[in-house]
Amino acid sequence: MSSAVLPTNLINSFDCRQGAVRAVRFNVNGNYCLSCGSDKSVKLWNPFKGTLLKTYTGAGSDVLDASSSPDNSIIASGGYDKVLTLHDVETGKIQRRVRGHGAYINAVLFNEEGIAVLSGSNDGTVRIYDIRQRNMEPVQVLDEATDGILCLDVSDHEVATGSADARIYDLRTGKIFIDYMGDSVTSVKLTNDRQCLITSTMGGHIRMIEKANGQLLTEYTGHQHKEYKLDCAILSSDCEIASASEDGFIYIYDVVESTILCRLGEDLKPRPRHIGTLTTHPTRPCIVAASQSKMYVWDSVSHEDL
C-alpha cells in the first residue's frame, strides 16, 4: 500500500533560460538536478534553491537527455547531433565526444558502477561504452530493436529499453525478454526491488510487468499521453508511480491499488499546456518536472523545512 507521504508542496519554480527543457534528471544522491535544453546546453542546478551551479556547452543541437555518473564527476549527454558528450563536472570541459549513432540520441544513462555509459538512439541501437578505455569504441551494441530507442533503465546486469516494444537484456546470460505493448514505449523503469518493469506507452497506459514471467500485474490510467514522449518514474517509497501528462498535470498513482492518489499542478497559474519530463528523488518524496522553459519542484515538506 502507498505510504501516502506525497510531494504535494510546490516549493520552487523558476525559468531555466535554456529554451525548451527537454529533460530533467536528479543525480544519484538527489542533491542536484540536470536540465537539458533546446539551446544546446546542459545545466546543473540546486533545484531546491533554484541556484544555477554550472552550464555545460558544446552540443551541436538540442540536448535530449543527460546523466550524472555515480561519483558526480562526469555528465554524459546526447541529443539531435547524434553525439555522446562527456563533460567534466567541476571544470565544465568536454572530455570526449563520441560519434557512432546514425540518428539522434534519445536516452543516456550510466550503469550503477559508473564505469559504463549507455546511449539509446532513434537508429534502433543501444551502445555501451566503458569510460575507462582510451578508445571509446562500444564494448557492446544492442541492435535487436525494430524501432528507435526512446528510453533506458539499468540495473547491475540488466538493460531495459523502450521502443515499439519493451525489452530487458540480461547481460550475464545474453537472454532478451520482449513484451509487446501495442503502442510506443516512451518510458521504462525497473522497480527498486528489480522484480518488475514499469512501462509508459502512447495511448495513456502505464503497466507494471513481472519480470520473471512477463505477467501484467497492474495498469494505471488517467493521465493524457497521445502525442509526445512522456516520462514516468517510481517514488523512493516504491509505493507510488508519478507520470507526466499532456494536460499539464503530474499524476501520482498508488502502485497496488492503481488509483490516482493526487494530481500535481492544480495551483500553477498559468498551468502548463503539457508536462513531458520529470525525475524523482532517490531517497524522499520529491519530484522535479519541467514544461517549456520552467522547472517545478514538489516536495513532501515545505520550503522552510528544507
Image (cartoon, rainbow, N blue to C red):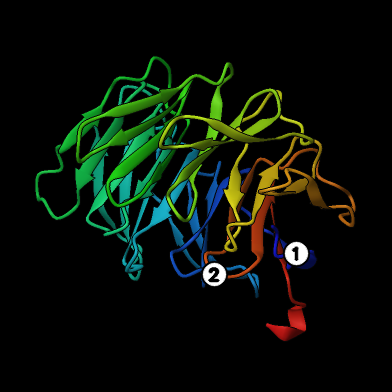
Q: Is residue 214 left or right of residue 253?
A: left
**Of pointers 1 and 2, the one earlier in the residue sequence:** 1
Q: Hey, which residue is sitting farthest left in the picture? A: 134
Q: Is residue 45 left or right of residue 68?
A: right
Q: Could you tell me residue 63's position as x and y percent?
A: 47, 42
Viewer-proximal residue among 279 and 106: 279
Three-letter amino acid code at disc 2?
A: Thr
Tell me the number on the disc at residue 129: none
| Marks 1/2: CA–CA distance | 15 Å
Q: Hey, which residue is sitting farthest bottom in the picture? A: 305
State which mark lies toward you, 1 or 2. 1
Mark 2 burial class by Cα count in 10 Å: few <14, some 14-19, many 20+: few
Q: Could you tell me residue 89's position as x and y percent?
A: 35, 65
Where is the C terminus found, in terms of image quarters? Answer: bottom right
Q: Residue at x 78, y 45 (%)?
A: 259
- Judge whether 131 appears above or below 107 on screen: below
Where is the N terminus found, in terms of image quarters? Answer: bottom right
Q: Quadrant of residue 169?
A: top left
Three-letter amino acid code at disc 1?
A: Ala
Q: Which residue is mark 1?
A: 4
Q: Quadrant of residue 198?
A: top right
Marker count (numbered): 2
SS assignment at label 1: loop
Q: Can residue 108 be seen?
A: yes
- Judge whether 178 appears above or below 248 on screen: above
Q: Residue at x 36, y 27 (%)?
A: 177
Viewer-proximal residue among 256 and 168: 256
Q: Residue at x 38, y 29 (%)?
A: 121
Q: Could you tell me residue 73's position as x and y percent?
A: 31, 67
Tell me the number on the disc at residue 283: 2
